[in-house]
Image (cartoon, rainbow, N blue to C red):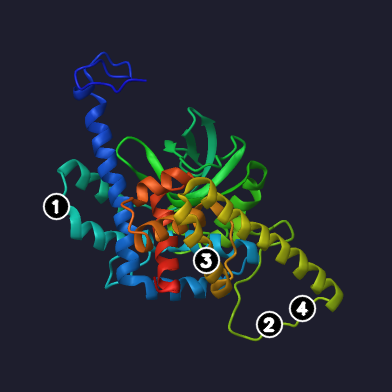
Amino acid sequence: MSMIGRNDPCYCGSGKKYKKCCLHKEEQTREVSFHQEGLIKFALENYQQDLAARTSEYVKKYPVGKDQEQTYANIAVCWEVFCSEIKGDQTPVELYVEKVKKSVKPEVAEILAGWTNTVPSLYKVVEQKTGFIFTVKDIWTEKVYDVTINAADKPKTDSALLGTLVSNGINYEFYVGYVEMPISELPPLKDAIEKLQPLGDAKEIFKNQFPAVLQLSLIDISAGVPKPKTDQTQANTEKPASEENTVTSVESEEKDEKYTAVTELVKANAETEVVKEAEKLWSEYINESKPAVRKEEIYAAALDYLVSKDIRGINSTQAETAKKYGVSPASLSSRYREMKELLSV
């Protein structure tokens, strides 16, 4: 397919020339996408220690399964960036927008300013409009959004998504990621969420009680809603040794499969010289951190970018690498920085 020219009819069918129609929107979206990456970079460079400490406390207070802890941490950090005061009475997103607003175009500044009012919510997938555009509806407000989802694993149309939507200038995107669940789980989950703060509206609950909301979305609540953990010594609920050993063995095998899948993805997408370095670094990384890998593509993308940029000196961008693996630049950026710090690259 040939490239569309500035004076050609716009592909959207409006009848206008491309330069008078979607060209400006696409340029604006690229600039906004740059700031999606810039926001998480800013937050981690300036407040990583505070964010990590808070997230660690939430994981202890609102425990989920071991295989869900990484997902919990990623989505919790996203909430902290948008809703948790980190310096004075300002959130990381407010501090970032304040820092960059004078250096961007007015229309971009307006979009970024809208991010400062963003709060997570729960959405029902209404339809898949194109290969990567989905229509979702807020469970409480019933407001409808068109959302771009570039990840390789697309949500099902009979599912619900928990996450933070941000405008990219044309439509919306889930910042960092989302939690997907069957639509059948919505009624009891909605009921449990509303009971967290009976007199509060949904936005207030998601802003103030999100760590608890996130736990409810990642565990089985059919047998009841758990109470937050305290610092008191928990009752001893250890399983019999034989059962514990069996469970541990199965979990170990599943974890090894995930680890292998990461290097296989790098082999399939990266240059040979990158693959060799990546395998060595990955071995060091998993021995050191023993990560609970839920989405292999994010780890593979971060590993590829780390080796390419910091070891091989290859000129590549996070956006390009993220696209190659079907993940968001923000997800890659977060994992890349964590790997870089741990491995001291």
Q: Please determine whether, in this image, residue 242 is positioned above or below residue 213.
A: below
Q: Which residue is mark 3?
A: 280
Mark 2, Cα crowd under 10 Å, few <14 / some 14-19 / many 20+, is few
Q: Amino acid at mark 1?
A: Ser
Q: Do the numbered discs 1 and 4 sit on residues whose CB atoms are within 8 Å? A: no
Task: Give SS at disc 2.
Answer: loop
Q: Do the numbered discs 2 and 4 sit on residues whose CB atoms are within 8 Å? A: yes
Q: Amino acid at mark 2?
A: Gln
Point out the residue furthest to the front here: 273
Q: Please determine whether, in this image, residue 61 is positioned above or below residue 31.
A: below
Give the percent coordinates (x, y) of residue 311.
37, 63
Mark 1, Cα crowd under 10 Å, few <14 / some 14-19 / many 20+, is few
Q: Quadrant of residue 154?
A: top right
Sequence-wise first label, 3 or 2:
2
Image depth: mark 3 or mark 4 in front = 3
Q: Quadrant of residue 240?
A: bottom right
Q: Quadrant of residue 330?
A: bottom left
Q: Which residue is mark 1?
A: 103
Image depth: mark 1 or mark 3 in front = 3
Sequence-wise first label, 1 or 3:
1
Q: Which residue is mark 2?
A: 234
Sequence-wise first label, 2 or 1:
1
Task: Give SS at disc 3.
Answer: helix
Asked if residue 283 lies left or right of residue 16, the reply is right
Query: Gap in Å between the C-alphas at discs 3 and 4?
Result: 39 Å
Task: Give SS at disc 1.
Answer: helix
Q: Amino acid at mark 4?
A: Thr
Q: Which residue is mark 4?
A: 237
